Image: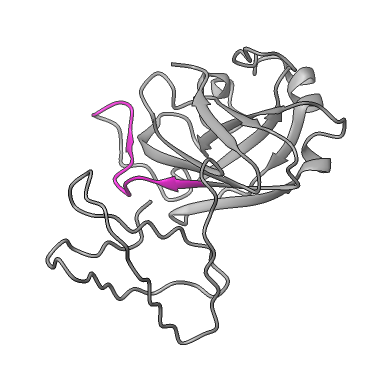
Amino acid sequence: MTVAEAGFVSASEGTVLFEAAAGEALLLVPSTQMAGQHGAFRLQLYSSTPLTVRRLADGHHALVRGAWTATSAGGCRVERTWQSNPQYCLELIPPVDQIRITLSRASTANTRAKSNALKPSMVDSMVGFYVLRCCSSETPAPLDLAQEGKVSAAGVWETPFTTDARTSCLLRLPMAMPTPAARYWLCVVPTTFAPGITGEFDLTVCSNSPVTLRCLTE
């Protein structure tokens, strides 16, 4: 989810003022308005509290835009329809020791799948996600979420559901994948608390090693 954007109104500088929570991690992306415009730039940041800035290496972060639709808004794990939620394959190449996964609402205008239904409550619209182990395969396939036993065994992490615009977790690899391998696959399942709540979302991953993120259920 975009927190703030500096308008493209000057060829020499872009500025923006915004509020952020203490300890919050943000991704800063400097850019020109048009592609192919080369040149050096300098970043200056001012804050009322101490802050640190570091450059992320290429390939160490990934972002995908997804959506809960009328057919894929399955709700949380206690719902019988939860297996219809979208699934995303997260591929990690060692060495890696930590991963931050963030789910953000792309819009606050969530609706119910049926147009004549009542507006969803804040509780129904809460968001969260599950992190599961994928099978060790060069071509990971969607998990069968209807098999409760296998899902429980594959479980790595489950975020609390929140009414906030985004939720995230920081995973350390020994927790996520206890055995050494040439590469690791995790499955991320973003959900709303209740089924039938449609809307777009952004899924972002940052890691200290190269990472790719793709949808398994398209």
Read off the magenta span: 103-115
Horizontal side of residue 74 vs 168, given as left or right: left
Q: Where is residue 79 shown, x and y percent of the image?
A: 58, 27
In-front residue for pair 136/33: 33
Q: Image quadrant of residue 188?
A: top right
Horizontal side of residue 95 vs 53, given as left or right: right
120 vs 84: above or below: below
Color scheme of the displayed model: one colour
At 70% from the left and 22% from the top, the residue drawn is 134
3 vs 108: above or below: below
Q: Which residue sits furthest bottom?
A: 48
Q: Which residue sits furthest left?
A: 9
Q: Where is residue 13 shown, x and y percent of the image?
A: 22, 71
**Residue 16 on the magenta segment:** no
Instruction: Tell me the quarter of the image containing the C terminus.
Output: top left
154 vs 23: above or below: above
In-front residue for pair 216/47: 47
At 58% from the left and 39% from the top, the residue drawn is 129
